[in-house]
Amino acid sequence: MAVRVRLAGTLKAIAAGKAEIPASAGRVRAIIGELDRAYAGLGSRVLGADGALKKSVLVHLNGQDVRQLEGVETVVGESDELLITIPLAGG
């Protein structure tokens, strides 16, 4: 069984319009790397130069913000759901 990664907003567009992508279980950082290899540019939209999540990015593991867990080092299991999104800003 694979991790279910859900993408929203501009990330969905980078992933050829796919809202849901299966990925291998592992740490959040590794899953983002896997997605970036499949969809070039996705990783740089999510991670900063320091390898941490960009402030504008929301990543939730089974409904909980990974920043409240172990950030990009959070372990994601095979039956988990990871939601990655960049909220729109503006007025």
Image (spheres, rainbow, N blue to C red):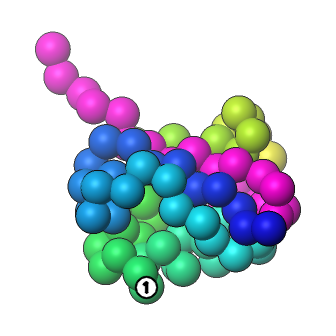
Q: In which quarter of the image is residue 45?
A: bottom left
**The N terminus: image quadrant:** bottom right
Q: Quadrant of residue 72?
A: bottom right
**60 relative position to 38: left or right:** right
Residue 13 in the image: above or below residue 91: below
Q: Determine crowd level at label 1: few under 14, some 14-19, many 20+ residues with C-alpha closer than 10 A.
A: few
**30 relative position to 6: left or right:** right
Q: Is mark 1 on a helix, strand or loop?
A: helix
Q: Could you say where residue 66 lies in the image, as x and y percent from the top left?
A: 70, 46
Q: Could you say where residue 39 lies in the image, as x and y percent from the top left?
A: 35, 76
Q: Does the magenta stretch include residue 90?
A: yes
Q: Could you say where residue 89 lies in the image, as x and y percent from the top left?
A: 25, 28
**The C terminus: image quadrant:** top left
Image point (31%, 42%), residue name: 9
Q: Could you say where residue 87 lies in the image, as x and y percent from the top left?
A: 36, 34
Question: For the magenta stretch, what is the residue range?
Answer: 71-91
Residue 68 vs residue 86, the one in the foreground: 86
Residue 32 in the image: above or below residue 66: below
What residue would you read off at disc 1? 37
Image point (71%, 33%), residue name: 63
**34 relative position to 65: left or right:** left
Q: Which residue lies furthest to the bottom in this view?
A: 37
Query: In this orientation, does residue 70 appear?
Result: no
Q: Is residue 73 magenta?
A: yes
Query: In this orientation, does residue 58 appear?
Result: yes
Q: Quadrant of residue 44?
A: bottom left
**8 relative position to 29: left or right:** left
